[in-house]
Image (cartoon, rainbow, N blue to C red):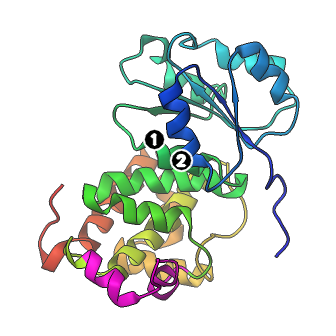
């Protein structure tokens, strides 16, 4: 397999908090090299060389909503996504949605309400995957019971064209489907249900990202578009064409997300009952 462009590029992290550095290093090292910088000037200088992702820990002294704009101006050649990590209560980033709409930042991840490690890891993936994986992970967190989050994160972050129970079990420590099934029985769900949920999340996330003009080409993470069509008909009761039409409406993307959340909730109900949140 030919290595992807930028495979060795690092994630740049601007933070003065030791605990946050330790936390992010542990989350990112399985996916990418990590470089820490201690000042805005150092970050601008480092962004003049290739980087995979820029992460700003938006707490003091970097609680400044104008900082991303200065970075974009100072390192205009950089195409790395910029993601801010902050508390949802931090006033400096109250305009998060506006900053994203203006493309000054690519995302704002809330430390107090979101599963930060997996979202940052998703942003560190190759550009043709990162946006749809972030979308899929957020949908997974909305639709699945909390004890299942780590399993769906594993499937979504490490998936391949062969997204199956067999492939998933092969990546476990003992490579046993039986051990995987026993572990998931504790949560009242079958491995096949989680794999099916991951497939649904992948397809819906791909289409949502494409509807924003950020993804081109065929649906990914499934063998072909016919598989996606069958999957959506079976789980959401719609076709890819119908989803594309819905996303063009005002609030259409939210409607699609809502349908996906309900479909995944139904897939993960233990023993035919509604899964507890």
Disc 2 versus disc 1: nearer the observer:
2
- The CA span between labels 2 and 1 is 9 Å
Residue 74 rendering spot, x and y as whole percentages? 83, 17
Looking at the image, residue 272 sits to the left or right of residue 32; the answer is left
Q: Quadrant of residue 30?
A: bottom right
Residue lying at 33% horizontally and 78% vertically, measured from the top left: 193
| Residue 204 in the figure: left or right of residue 55 | left
Residue 181, image quadrant:
bottom left
Main SS type for the magenta part? helix
On the image, the x and y values in percent for residue 41 come to 77, 14
Front residue (pair 99, 180)? 180
- Marks 2 and 1 in Cβ contact (< 8 Å): yes
The magenta region covers 163-184
Task: Give the image quarter of residue 192.
Answer: bottom left
**Is residue 113 shown in magenta?**
no
Position of 55 with respect to 157 (left or right) is right
Q: Is residue 272 above or below residue 32?
A: below
Give the position of the N terminus as an image quadrant. Answer: bottom right
Is residue 237 visible in this depiction of the protein? no
> At 50% across and 64% down in the image, what residue appears?
156
Residue denoted by label 2: 27
At which x and y percent is residue 47?
81, 29
Mark 2, secondary structure of its residue: helix
Q: Position of residue 65 (x, y in %)?
A: 58, 14
Task: Tell how many labels.
Answer: 2
Estimate how packed mark 2 is, as few (under 14), some (14 to 19) or many (20 or more) residues with alpha carbons within 10 Å: some
Q: Which mark is residue 116?
A: 1
Asked if 137 appears above or below 232 in the picture, the reply is above
């Amino acid at each position: 397999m030919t290595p992807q462009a930028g495979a060795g590029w690092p994630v740049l992290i601007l933070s003065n908090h030791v605990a946050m550095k330790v936390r992010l290093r542990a989350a990112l090292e399985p996916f990418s090299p990590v470089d820490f910088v201690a000042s805005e000037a150092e970050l601008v200088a480092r962004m003049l060389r290739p980087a995979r992702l820029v992460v700003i820990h938006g707490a003091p002294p970097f609680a400044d909503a104008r900082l991303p704009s200065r970075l974009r101006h100072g390192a205009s050649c950089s195409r790395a996504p910029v993601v801010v990590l902050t508390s949802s209560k931090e006033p400096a980033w109250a305009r998060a949605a506006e900053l994203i709409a203006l493309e000054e930042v690519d995302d704002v991840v809330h430390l107090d309400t979101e599963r930060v490690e997996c979202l940052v890891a998703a942003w560190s993936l190759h550009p043709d995957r990162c946006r749809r994986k972030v979308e899929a992970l957020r949908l997974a967190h909305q639709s699945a019971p909390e004890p299942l989050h780590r399993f769906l994160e594993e499937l979504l972050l490490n998936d391949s064209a062969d997204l199956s129970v067999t492939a998933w079990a092969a990546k476990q420590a003992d490579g046993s489907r039986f051990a995987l099934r026993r572990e998931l029985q504790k949560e009242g769900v079958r491995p096949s249900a989680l794999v099916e949920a991951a497939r649904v999340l992948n397809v819906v996330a791909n289409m949502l990202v494409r509807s924003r003009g950020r993804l081109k080409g065929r649906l990914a993470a499934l063998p072909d578009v016919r598989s996606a069509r069958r999957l959506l008909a079976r789980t959401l009761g719609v076709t890819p064409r119908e989803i594309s039409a819905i996303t063009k409406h005002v609030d259409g993307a939210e409607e699609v997300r809502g349908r996906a959340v309900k479909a995944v909730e139904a897939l993960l109900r233990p023993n035919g009952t509604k899964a507890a949140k």
